[in-house]
Image (spheres, grey):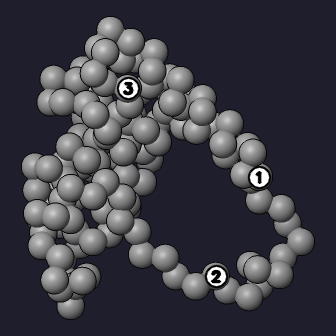
Amino acid sequence: MSKISGSLLDRIDLHIEVNPVPFDKLSTKETSETSAAIRARVIDAREVQRLRFRENPKVFHNAQMNTKALRKHCQLSDQSLALLQQAMEKLKLSARAYDRILKVARTIADLERAEAIQNHHIAEAIQCRSLDREGWLG
């Protein structure tokens, strides 16, 4: 990890540390969401994005948004903006990370069919930036 530069990490939308699954979770009789259900949600979110960007033939999904599109489609409440500002300052995130968080939060909101990005979407998107956290690399 120490050989990967910060500027390269900035260009990766999602980086999540995955811990081993405990035995009790593996052996549970409870069922989780099926792959088919997840696939249906993703297809639905992609359709939401296709419709959002239908007037721009070069943009098909949230990851392709430029700054102008980010401002238009990723408007935040004061509370969400304060949460993002706190994360930016505490984690010393870059401007590129800021854009990535907004794009991921918009996608999370799309998966939930939420019109607006909400606090929990921002919080989840920040969690997807685990490699940005100070001290993670040692």
Name the kind of residue labelled 3 in the image: Phe
Which labelled disc corresponds to residue 21? 2
Residue 18 vs residue 120, the one in the foreground: 18
Q: Which residue is mark 1?
A: 34
**Residue 94 at x, y = what percent?**
10, 56
Q: Which residue is rendered at x = 47% and y = 36% of the image?
A: 109
> Which element type, helix, strand or loop, lies under badge 3?
loop
Residue 72 versus residue 3 in the image, above or below: above
Alpha-carbon span between mark 2 and mark 3: 35 Å
Label whose residue precedes the other's in the sequence (1 or 3): 1
Amino acid type of the residue tagged 2 in the rendering: Val
Q: Tell me which amino acid carries mark 1.
A: Thr
The quadrant holding residue 78 is top left
Left or right side of 107 for 23: right
Q: Residue at x 16, y 64 (%)?
A: 8
Judge by depth and name the residue closer to the eye, 93 or 34: 34
Q: Earlier in the sequence, mark 1 or mark 2?
A: 2
Residues at circles 1 and 3 in contact by the CB criterion of under 8 Å: no
User: Residue 82: x percent and y percent?
Assistant: 22, 45
- Residue under pointer 3: 60
Alpha-carbon distance for marks 1 and 2? 18 Å
Q: Nearer the viewer, residue 82 or 103?
A: 103
Question: x and y percent of residue 34 in the render?
Answer: 77, 52
Going 53% across and 23% down the picture, which residue do you hit? 47
